Image (cartoon, rainbow, N blue to C red):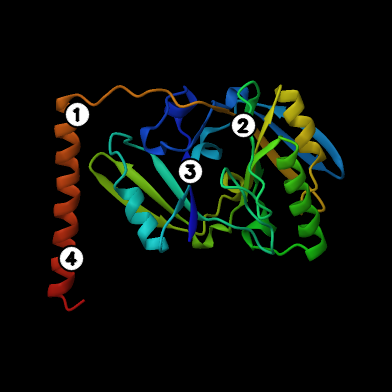
């Protein structure tokens, strides 16, 4: 199974501080450099950032796991120095037969070509009631979208794309010092959610906006997009011996708490 893990934004990421747990993954520049496109009654409007942190994603990574429980457990053991972070775990894939793609290639076997002279932009499709309900577009609409994706990769524009299932099967892992907690979806604030993304490479933000407006989205009516510039990973400072000891202590506390819970559950008869 494939999952997308999204690092929810906060004041720290909006200052440009990159969370270590997302490596490898895609980190996004603060929303002060972002733009939202709204299509209402067929007409486009643009709204420039910054936007409220609670509505934002700071970065994301696609991961394989055997189950939802397995990916939650993986995320709970990510670096614990990212205190206060919230990681949202979503089922990858969209209703219908739309096909995701990334550096591994498209369904037709076409490999995206990264051009270092161009800037990477992530185009998020903001969620709505239909997306949260996993509404299935007509097959002919999905066919057009898949063909457009394939052509975009062949043209050297598209680098990746994937849909996300509604948040009914999602979870959020909250970090607080040495403790983590898990909150199950669905999440009621739909305006905070993402329904899918495309990563393109373009010479400018204006070119990325033009591409986004021309895409054959499966939604026939109103929709909202968010265009964010992806940035390259920075080298994190190596952990000092003190940081390593603190990390080991935090993980030992987590392991001890997990064992206590397991023994307590066994003593209660499961």
Q: Nearer the viewer's eye, disc 2 or disc 1?
A: 2
Relative vertical location of residue 163 with respect to residue 240 in this rendering, above or below: below
Q: Which residue is mark 3?
A: 61
Q: Would residue 72 be visible to someone looking at this image?
A: yes
The residue pinned by badge 1 equals 243
Residue holding disc 2: 114
User: Residue drawn at (63%, 43%), measured in percent from left and top?
Assistant: 111
Q: Earlier in the sequence, mark 2 or mark 4?
A: 2
The image position of residue 172, as x and y in percent, is 42, 51
- Residue depicted at x 32% and y 51%: 181
Given contact means CB atoms under 8 Å apart, are the residues at marks 2 and 3 in contact?
A: no
Residue drawn at (50%, 54%), measured in percent from left and top? Answer: 90
Q: Is residue 43 left or right of residue 28?
A: right
Q: Nearer the viewer, mark 2 or mark 4?
A: 2
Q: Position of residue 246 (x, y in %)?
A: 16, 34
Decide which of tag 1 and tag 4 comes sooner along the chain. Answer: 1
User: Upstream in the sequence, badge 2 or badge 1?
Assistant: 2
Separation of disc 2 and disc 1 at Cα?
Answer: 36 Å
Q: Helix or strand or loop: what does disc 4 sit on?
A: helix
Q: Disc 2 or 3, which lies upstream in sequence?
A: 3
Count of marks placed on residues: 4
The residues tagged by marks 1 and 3 sit, at their Cα atoms, a distance apart of: 25 Å
Query: Label 2: how many residues lie within 10 Å, few (<14), some (14-19) or many (20+)?
Result: some
Q: Residues within 10 Å of mark 1 (few under 14, many from 20)?
A: few
Distance Cα–Cα, label 2 vs label 4: 47 Å
Quick one: which residue is furthest to the right in this view? 42
């Amino acid at each position: 199974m494939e999952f997308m893990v999204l690092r929810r934004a906060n004041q720290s990421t909006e200052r440009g501080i990159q969370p270590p747990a997302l490596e490898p993954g895609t980190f996004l520049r603060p929303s002060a450099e972002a733009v939202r496109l709204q299509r209402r009654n067929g007409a486009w409007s643009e709204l420039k950032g910054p936007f409220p942190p609670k509505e934002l994603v700071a970065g994301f990574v696609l991961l394989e796991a055997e189950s939802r429980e397995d990916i939650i457990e993986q995320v709970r053991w990510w670096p614990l120095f990212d205190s206060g972070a919230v990681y949202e775990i979503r089922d990858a894939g969209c209703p219908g037969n739309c096909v995701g793609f990334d550096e591994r290639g498209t369904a037709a076997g076409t490999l995206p070509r990264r051009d270092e002279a161009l800037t990477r932009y992530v185009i998020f499709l903001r969620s709505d009631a239909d997306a949260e309900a996993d509404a299935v577009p007509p097959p002919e609409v999905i066919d057009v979208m898949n063909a457009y994706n394939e052509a975009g990769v062949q043209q050297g524009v598209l680098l990746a794309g994937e849909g996300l299932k509604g948040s009914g099967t999602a979870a959020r892992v909250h970090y607080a010092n040495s403790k983590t907690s898990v909150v199950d979806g669905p999440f009621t604030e739909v305006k905070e959610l993402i329904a899918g993304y495309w990563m393109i490479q373009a010479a400018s933000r204006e070119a990325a906006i033009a591409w986004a407006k021309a895409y054959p989205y499966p939604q026939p009516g109103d929709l909202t997009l968010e265009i964010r510039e992806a940035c390259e990973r920075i080298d994190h400072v190596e952990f000092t011996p003190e940081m390593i000891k603190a990390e080991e202590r935090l993980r030992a506390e987590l392991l001890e708490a997990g064992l206590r819970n397991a023994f307590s559950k066994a003593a209660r008869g499961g």
